[in-house]
Amino acid sequence: MELKEIGKIKTEEENMFIQINKEYIKGLQGLEGFSHIDVLWWFDKCDNSNSRSVLEVKKPYKNSPEKLGVFSTRSPERPNPIALSVTQVTHIDYEKGIIYITYIDAMNDSSILDLKPYTPSLDKVEKPYVPQWCSHWPLCYEKSGDFDWQNEFLF
């Protein structure tokens, strides 16, 4: 299996953007008009044998059970440190290969593995259900920005 980095997350003061590598800029064609994109990126700080061997975590959220499997968390420690984030696109500079975004939960210089346009017909679940311990979390991306996430985590 071979993965290719297509770009990097960039944070400069209050600005966040995705810088696409030159050889992949043509892949941005047609992305205009999509308000959001799914970003698959690499948790590079957890790309080590210890992090990749973690399958259970101790109570990461205040209201969660005492132990959770990594596949029921958003933990960066997992067999393959692949992250998925939805972000809002504010502007695309096609010549420079820059996608300006509102926010992403990635660190500066995190590697981008892939981008996909967010489409409600494939990505939106009308009536999802979640465990009781996280049922008070926001129901959508737009409301999560105002939610007190710091009060949810134990780390």
Image: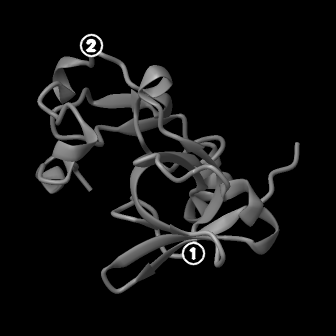
Q: Quadrant of the N terminus?
A: top right
Q: Is residue 87 above or below residue 17?
A: above
Q: Quadrant of the C terminus?
A: bottom left
Q: Nearer the viewer, residue 43 or 3?
A: 3
**x%, y% of residue 115?**
61, 49
Q: Is residue 138 above or below residue 135?
A: below
How many labels, in total? Answer: 2
Residue at horizontal 44%, vertical 45%?
75
Disc 1 to disc 2, how far (Cα)?
35 Å
Q: Is residue 73 above or below residue 105?
A: above
Q: What is the crowding at mark 2: few (fewer than 14 residues within 10 Å), some, or many (at least 20)? A: few
Which mark identifies residue 127? Answer: 2
Residue at horizontal 72%, vertical 65%?
25
Q: Nearer the viewer, residue 27 or 19?
A: 27
Q: Which residue is mark 1?
A: 109
Which mark identifies residue 52? Answer: none
**x%, y% of residue 86?**
42, 46
Q: Is residue 85 visible?
A: no
Q: Mark 2: which amino acid?
A: Lys
Q: Secondary structure at mark 2?
A: loop
**Which dot, 1 or 2, sits closer to the camera?**
2
- Dot 1 or dot 2: first in sequence order is 1
Q: Is residue 23 left or right of residue 92?
A: right
